[in-house]
Amino acid sequence: MKRTAVNPVPFRLVVSAGRACPFCRGLYYLCAERLDYPEMAVESYITLSQLQGRIEEVLCGGFPAPLWITAEIGEMKVNTRSGHCYLQLVEKGGRNGVPQAQAQAVIWAGRYGMLSSFFRGATGAELGVGMKVLLSVTVAYHELYGLSLQVTDIDPLYTLGDLAQQRLQTIARLKEDGVFDLNRELGIPEVPQRIAVVSSPQAAGYQDFMKELGASPYRFDTMLFGAVMQGHGAEQSIIEALEAVADAADRFDALVVIRGGGSQSDLSFLNSYLLGFHVAQFPLPVIAGLGHDKDQSVVDMVAALSLKTPTAVAGFLVEQAAAFDGRLEDAAVAVANLGRRVLDREEKELHMYGALLRERVSGARFRMNWKLEALGEGVAAGARRALQGRAVRLDELKGRLAERACRAVAGSVERLAQSEKLLAAADPRTILARGFAVVRAGGRALTDAADAESGTPLDITLYKGTLTAKVTDHGKK
């Protein structure tokens, strides 16, 4: 019994040439057109392998000869057992780097050794992820693995030219952003001694740099900020190290970015816009020693100073210190010579002023001696005149003193006689002779009758003799 499909929707395979497919973007594309055929028996369908075989025939027939294509290596893997190299090729569009096309490619082991050696000899670098390459490929289609490209040749000059073009684009963009000259405007300190170093800790260039500094007679305080200085991830690693240095910028005089030698392709990351932007705006002067003597990279151009090798950077730092040391020595010699000249001049002037002072002191002493002698004679004459005048005055005062003394004595005698009379009149005996008496009670003179109680014994002193009495009435009511 035959089975028929229920309302099948038949399609036919259409090969179109000369137009771009909106999905695969090739010169040829296959698409399915719906056919308005009546219902068809299942036996009229083809198998998947037959379909794949037809697709292979169309693709391989459409691209019989190798094609040169440009693409970027997105992924790369070499099979260690077979020696085949498997690539993922991508084409990126816009600044955001979003892939707009991609394809799988393979370099068979028989060709990979030859092509990789040829590329390395021409560019100085190994094929790697992120490189933009010009490849000769043949289109292949497999029933299980689908579409793939087989690489038959490579043009290394295209890769080198692409690196140069990227470098020019980065330079133009940095200048357009107004940051290209910022780091150079900082200038190099006269004696940079506190150095931040961005390098790989295991790099021979870093070891040479430290050895050169250590052999100098000057002290340098260095701090290493480790970073990957080659290959994929080097750009981001260096940027992270730069950000770490910037966070402690006040601890350093300058930043040194160094690495050993390498090919132009190895150093291609030094032409990236993002890394150049960070170096151009770095708050410390950047000294680059990136191990090449050909075309300058963008980092070399935006750095405050660019030297060929890490050893040259260390030599520059030592030379700066030596030059400053020499200037200090020259200044010390100049100061010593100037001091000697000043001392000689001052010594001569001191001798001259000493002689002049002695001469003036001698003249002043002679004049002062003459004046002192004249003053002495004048003082002696004045003293004699004063003494003579004082003697006459003294005689006059003696006469006046005798006269006044006599009058004073006479007056004192008269006052003394009067005082004697007054004292005699105030004598208690004189008062008692007039009939008065002194009454005492308990040895104390009484002045108020109320102070004596009845029966109190009294002592009464008269002008002549003493009486003893007793109070019979003290007058109290």
Image (tube, helix red, strand yellow):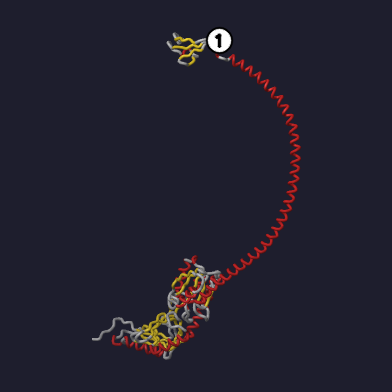
Q: Which residue is mark 1?
A: 433
Q: Residue at x 66, y 64 (%)?
A: 344
Q: Classify residue 131 by image quadrant.
A: bottom left
At label 1, which amino acid type do we have?
A: Ala
Front residue of 294/9: it is 294
Q: Residue at x 69, y 58 (%)?
A: 354
Q: Is residue 101 visible?
A: no
Tell me: residue 38, above or below residue 221.
Answer: below
Tell me: residue 443, above or below residue 287.
Answer: above
Residue 385, given in percent of the width and then of the height, sits at: 76, 37
Q: Residue at x 76, y 42 (%)?
A: 378
Tell me: residue 38, above or below residue 171.
Answer: below
Residue 439, given in percent of the width and then of the height, sits at: 49, 12
Residue 470, given in percent of the width and then of the height, sits at: 44, 10
Taking 86 as reference, is 462 left or right?
A: right
Q: Is residue 314 visible?
A: yes
Front residue of 122/68: it is 122
| Number of residues whose C-alpha sits closer than 10 Å to that of mark 1, classed few (under 14), some (14–19) or many (20 or more) | few
Determine the secondary structure under disc 1. helix
